[in-house]
Image (tube, grey):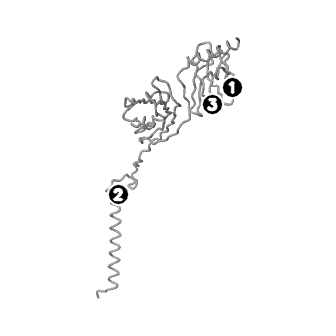
Amino acid sequence: MAPLLREVFFTLTFIHVFLHVADCVKVILGDQFIFPVNCESGESGTLLRVFGHSTSEVATCHSGKWTVKMYKDRMMINSSKIGFNRTVYNDGGVYELRFSKPKDPVQLEVVTAWRVSVVEDETVILPCNFKTTGRTGLTVVWEKNGKRLYVKNRSDGGTGPPDRLSMSTDWFTHGDLSLTVARVQPEDRGDYFCYVQDEHGNHSGNPTAVRLTVTEKKAHQVITSATPVNQTQSCSEQIKPWKTSTLVVSVFLLVAVIAVVNSSYPLF
């Protein structure tokens, strides 16, 4: 009877954790991640990693001081904060925060990312693919830095800045959910996440991450020096030197020809 009660207890604990999990927190593989909890003076608590029906201590907080129990080679402490200095793929999972004040557990999702670079004012495609065959009621969501940027389903044209963001009209047929960003601006740089929701609003499959780097376009350099050769020239101005050079060469050739003719056929 005791083993059965213990199993029921662990099951109820596991269900309790998942019922209170906040929105999934996505982080790109290799990036830092700081847990949303502070170890303040006079407070005690525990950061736990949930493994199925059991938990393991990651770190403990006592009187404003963290003590790391797991992942000692990658955990960092910054004042009252604690987190991973670099994430690995297996860090993804549920973490429970047992403190005096109730705190929602954290569901951490570690994703690999495409790295895309583009020059300002150019057009770029952020890749994302998903198997849509045999699926109905799907909604595509693109987020940037944790905020919804573009949402599209089969019944609408997509919500977002319509003048610069777009997806293929065949996205559902081909499973190509890539986002096209036109006239890229420096503020477009950042981390983008693409994922799919079913008709109930649940996430389906793993999200795709894209880290976009924008290089500012270098303006055409205009020298204001008084030296004429360094000034910007119009098309006609650029032709003038060529005309002058051609005239000079022509005069020399004409003189040379006359000299040759005179030497061959003297007039006197």
Residue located at (32% from left, 67% from top): 247
Q: Position of residue 110 (x, y in %)?
A: 58, 30
Is label 2 in a helix, a strand or a loop?
helix
**Amino acid at circle 1:** Met
Between disc 2 and disc 1, the foreground one is 1
Residue 160 rendering spot, x and y as whole percentages? 40, 30
Q: Which residue is mark 3?
A: 90
Residue 163: image quadrant is top left
Residue at label 1? 70
Mark 3 or mark 1: which comes first in sequence?
Answer: 1
Q: Extreme bottom residue here?
A: 268
- Is 53 in front, or is 26? 53
The residue mark sitting in front, 3 or 1, is: 3
Instruction: For the N terminus, give its image quadrant.
Output: top right
Q: Amino acid at mark 3?
A: Asn
- Label 2: which residue? 238
Q: How much space separates mark 2 and mark 1, taking CA atoms?
A: 71 Å
**Mark 2 surroundings: few (<14), some (14-19) or many (≥20) residues within 10 A:** few
> What is the number of the mark on residue 240?
none
Q: Earlier in the sequence, mark 2 or mark 1?
A: 1
Task: Name the secondary structure under disc 1.
Answer: loop
Horizontal and vertical percent for residue 62? 68, 16
On the image, the x and y values in percent for residue 149 come to 44, 29
